Amino acid sequence: MATATLPVPGWAKRVAAVPDNAFSFVFLGDLHFDKLMHHDMGYLKDKYPNDIHQIENYSRITRENLASLMQVSRECAKETDASFLLQIGDFVEGLCGSKELASTQVNEFIDLVDRQQFGLPFLAIKGNHDITGTGAKEVYQEIVLPWQSRQLNRPATTANNMYVHKNARFILFDCFSEKESLVWLREAIKEHKKSEVLFFCTHVPVVPYDARSNWHVYVHPNQATEREELLNLLGEHKAVVLSGHLHKTSIVTRNTPSGNFVQIGLGSVVPSLDAPVKSHLKGLDAYSERLVELEPDFTPSTLELRKQILKEEKPFIRHYEYADFCGYSSVHVGRENNVSMTIYANASKTPWSQVNITELFRA
């Protein structure tokens, strides 16, 4: 099994001239921007009583830690000469209770991004929280898509979009319109050239990797055909899958009959600026049914299903690493299409690890 993580001294220093097709971008996981004033509390108590504690916690994280994360992301983008930032969905918490409150939440997040003065496009994938709650879907259509059109510099009428930069193609996949999205993907992926790196960007992961193994794309038994098609497309095109949703860090190589693809999972909901890295697992032996023990109290009624999913997935796993923490990352595409990623815990400027993604395809 290829060794893929190495300690590194800090941000890669900006060079005077970026050679040929080489470029970098900052990759962010779920953010869940939130304030208590964004919510109709009566609505929450009636419709989402189990989410109130979560909303209180995300509002605290927004208040205490998000500014530091945005600042260090801006500094990282500058030091690595990043071309853009990519955020993998759930940029807001949602569950506001009215279209007016949902509009306020989204507009305040966009204003937060603008105030960072990145001077770069800020690409945001659709997450489930971005479209959850009264009025949220309408706000996504009326506010988020026009905002993303400006970032993409092309019309964005749905959450399925393509972004091409230098010698890399980014497929921005809407995993909440599964049937329509797969139809779109079949045609869109044909535009991928063999000379290009392909990034497949999806909020919900493709490959299960922790206790919540039933939280991945096309998970239902009646979607087995669609799942197999997606897996083979990703393997055939040697995709680098960027995902979020689970608020954990993971690095997985997954084999298919068409070849390998690599999936990176990342979360950016930083609970505290000195939060420890927990449950660091590495190696194929760590990928097993016992991953359900990472969250022993999670939905006991699905325990056997989740264990079975992990058991069935294990024969296809070629590399596995997992850790319980949130942070941010910098991705570098070299002039010969070599891809690497530096991952940082919390808002630290000291790397947690550097991942040689290209090498992982050979695992």
Image (cartoon, rainbow, N blue to C red):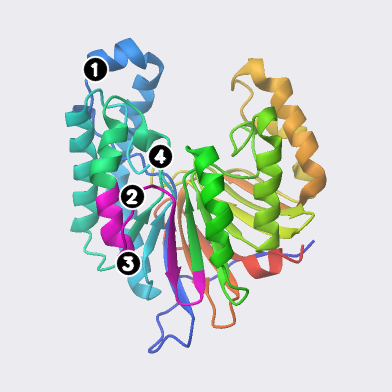
Which amino acid, mark 2? Thr
Closer mark to the observer between disc 4 and disc 2? 2
Which of the marked residues, 3 or 4, is nearer the chain's N terminus? 3
What label sits on residue 75 in the rendered view? 3
Which of the marked residues, 1 or 3, is nearer the chain's N terminus? 1
- The picture places residue 138, in percent across and down from the top left corner, at 27, 34
Label 3 to label 4: alpha-carbon separation: 21 Å
Please tell me whether residue 66 is drawn above or below residue 80 in the rendered image. Answer: above
Which of the marked residues, 1 or 2, is nearer the chain's N terminus? 1
What label sits on residue 140 in the rendered view? none
Please tell me whether residue 82 is drawn above or below residue 17 in the rendered image. Answer: above
Q: What is the magenta range?
A: 145-168
- The picture places residue 251, in percent across and down from the top left corner, at 63, 53
The quadrant of the rendering that contains the C terminus is: bottom right
Task: Say few, some or many: other residues with alpha carbon within 10 Å of mark 1 (under 14 / 14 to 19 / 20 or more).
Answer: some
Residue marked by disc 2: 157
Closer mark to the observer between disc 1 and disc 2? 2
Which amino acid, mark 3? Glu
The quadrant of the rendering that contains the N terminus is: bottom right
Which amino acid, mark 1? Met
Verify CB contact (< 8 Å) between mark 4 and mark 2. no
Residue marked by disc 4: 271
Task: Say few, some or many: other residues with alpha carbon within 10 Å of mark 4 (under 14 / 14 to 19 / 20 or more).
Answer: many
